[in-house]
Amino acid sequence: MKQAYELPDVSLSVARASIEVTVRPTELIAAEQIRAEEKQRLVGFFPNFYTSYVYDAAPLTTKQKFSLAVRGTFDPVAMIGVGLAAGIEQASNSYAGYGQGAAGYSKRFAAKFVDGRSSDLLTHAVFPSLLHQDPRYYYQGSGSIRSRLAHAVRSAFIARSDSGRTVFNSSYLLGDLTAGALSNLYYPKANRGANLVFTNAAVGLAGRVGTNLMREFLSKRLTTNVPGDGKE
């Protein structure tokens, strides 16, 4: 004898997977990274704001470039360097037209102060904003000594664009030359001319190469509040 059974309807519910993705604006990420960079100091004292230990750091806006440049160039510690440089020039009687004594030192101090501020603002903010280039040095931190050495020297001539491309560092070259040209307005007449412009530019470029080498091989160990490890 056959029997028929009626089965109840059975329905299974499948839980929905919920994935939440938080997207933060690039400008906000850059602002957080700048705040971290502004805490970087060599031996806890000298500003090391323009070394990015985050190799894929977010690009800076024009406002952020100017803000970082002003923060760095007017840091109180920078004034110590100005005073020392003026004292060395005074002792060696460089730019003799300034004279000696307190008046001569004051003129040298003022000249070095304007040199540094104009160079920093032009190379770190004005031209990088106009040409859409990143003024920071990107710490590599990995690879052979030879590759790191090449990276440090090359970074004096090559920059990262705001879009992430590798470009010629025209911001630094133009800023350096422009700052040298402005120095003709306040250096002694006997020292003015094209020679002053190109001498200052050459000294600035050599200083940049030396600074990059220090950044690559020494700064991470000596810098406080380092937020990253460079290129992995």
Image (cartoon, rainbow, N blue to C red):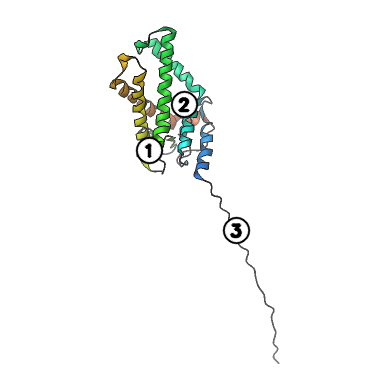
Mark 2 and mark 3: span between their CA atoms? 48 Å
Q: Residue at x 39, y 14 (%)?
A: 89
Q: Looking at the image, is mark 3 or mark 1 earlier in the sequence?
A: 3
- The amino acid marked with disc number 1 is Leu
Q: Which of these two is toward me, 92 or 59?
A: 59
Q: Quadrant of residue 157?
A: top left
Q: Secondary structure at mark 3?
A: loop
Task: Tell me how far mark 2 sits from mark 1, CA to CA.
Answer: 21 Å
Residue 131 x %, y %: 38, 38
Tag 3 and tag 1, C-beta contact below 8 Å: no
Residue at the extreme left of the image, as rendered:
194
Between tags 2 and 1, which lies in front?
1
- Judge whether 184 appears above or below 96 on screen: below
Question: Which residue is located at x 52 percent, y 31 percent?
Answer: 38
Q: Is residue 56 above or below residue 114?
A: below
Q: CA distance from mark 3 to mark 1?
A: 43 Å
Query: Which structural element holds mark 1?
Result: helix
Please provide percent x and percent y for residue 95: 35, 13
**Which of the labelled discs sits on residue 18, or is there none?**
3
Label 1: how many Cα within 10 Å (few below 14, some 14–19, many 20+): few
Seen in the image, is 83 located left or right of residue 7? left
The earlier-in-sequence mark between 2 and 3 is 3
Residue type at mark 3 is: Ser
> Which residue in the protein does label 2 denote?
73
User: Observer-nearest residue: 131 or 134?
Assistant: 131
